[in-house]
Amino acid sequence: MAGRNGLTRREFAAAGLGLGLALAGCSENGSSGGSGGDLLIGASLPLTGQFSQPGQEAERGYRIWREMVNADGGILGRQVELKITDDASSQDTVVADYNRLITQDRVDFLLGTFSSLLNYPASAVAERQGMVFVEPAGGAENIFTRGFKKIFFAQPALSADQANTFVDWVKSLPEAERPASAAYTTQDDPFTRPVIERLQGLLEDLGIKTVYTSVYPAETTNMQPVAAAIAGKKPELVAHGAVFQDGVGLVRALKQQQFSPKALFQMSAPSHAGQYSSGIGEANTQGVFYSVSWHESAPTPLNKEFVAAYAKKYKGAVPAEDAADAFAAAQVLQAGVEGANGTDQDKVAEWLHGNEVETVLGPLKWDERGAPVGSFLLAQWQGGKVEIVSPADAATAEQAVYPKPDWQ
């Protein structure tokens, strides 16, 4: 079991395997691909397995970016080709995939996979080979404590800071209106767990009493025991470190328990757009909070075009946040290559460390670790769609829905 900023033994083993395979199978000069011709960019994504839902959305984001950039003339006059493999949500497979992309496919550049669990070992392979690694998801703090020079996280902040805007919203309430008690539960995942643990500490500092905490295995499919325990404590606030299916499962289970808190904050799960609303019923999304890196109506560069291209390609659907994050990661890589005016990995990394990049998420910049320097938005489902409720300068709704209405 991982601690607040730690990894499981299995994660360390996978990271070690990644370094070992890199040493065994690759050179150290960090160069790959050929000059001229198409620019080949490789990525391994969880298209099947535990993370298949967000993994498939990330693939959509990458592919739409490729179509748009090629239609605009490519990068430095070169058309872009993508080599995307399926890591099946497996740490062992993702290590093998990135080694293969580097040594056999000879890709020019890499884009990251989904989740901290997979990006931890994958980024170790890239770093050992001296290749830039821009990841669309993977904000666990321990990814950025290894002294890597070529990793960049293409979101506004690390995951542990994801709930800070929710805490700020709670602080903004008159003290008498704040939730008096809270329950915290999270999947045992290096992305979700630090967020919920930090959120618990910050809300306890505000005087909100903790009445329940739990950590459940990542493979959990039955959320009824957790829901029953929460319902028995009757907290006014429920904070849930959910990836996707577990978020849908907890709402369904709480509904069966006939328990509805005054406020519900979930991670990741509510960002899956139509999949989330169809999973729990549109009426039951009303008032659900979550932190988000992106909004479909944001006036950021290319955002309108990205949303339109996604809708055209996927039968009018609204992009999930994971698709936008992947699109932004590709924008970051593109900016680095164009800024460095070439494919030298060292120069691209140096340019990214020294410059801000405009993306569909807004402007992104990084510290010396490759960790982003910014903050998330606080989103809430209102009237069957997602609105931004904080900060005020980015808000798309006049106010938050609170208390949350009962389940329908």
Image (spheres, grey):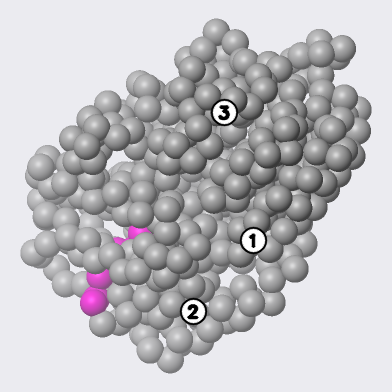
Q: Residues within 10 Å of mark 2 (few under 14, many from 20)?
A: many
Q: Which of the pair 292/50 is nearer the observer?
A: 50
Q: Name above or below for residue 125 compared with residue 349.
A: below
Q: Nearer the viewer, residue 109 or 227?
A: 227
First along the sequence among labels 2 and 3: 2
Residue labelled with disc 3 = 284
Q: Residue at x 75, y 50 (%)?
A: 226
* Residue in front for this viewpoint, 182 or 363: 182
Q: Indicate left or right for 77 with 376 as reference.
A: left
- Quarter of the image where the N terminus is located: bottom right
Q: Position of residue 164 (x, y in %)?
A: 68, 33
**Disc 3 on helix, strand or loop?**
helix
Residue 115 image position (x, y, % from top left): 52, 57
Q: Mark 3, residues whose alpha carbon is within 10 Å: few (<14), some, or many (≥20)?
A: many
Tag 1 near tag 2, CB within 8 Å: no
How many angstroms separate mark 1 from mark 3 (CA)?
A: 22 Å
Tell me, for residue 148, which label it has, or none: none
Give, as a three-letter code, the residue at label 3: Asn
Q: Which mark is residue 92?
A: 2
**Which residues are drawn in magenta?**
105-112
Magenta stretch: residue 106 in it?
Answer: yes
Residue 338, visible in the rendered structure:
no
Quadrant in the picture for residue 28 = bottom left
* Mark 2 residue type: Asp
Name the side, left or right, on which 241 lies relative to 294. Answer: right
Q: Which residue is mark 1?
A: 220
Asked whether, in this view, residue 342 is left or right of residue 375, the answer is: left
| Mark 1: secondary structure | loop
Magenta-colored segment: predominant secondary structure:
loop
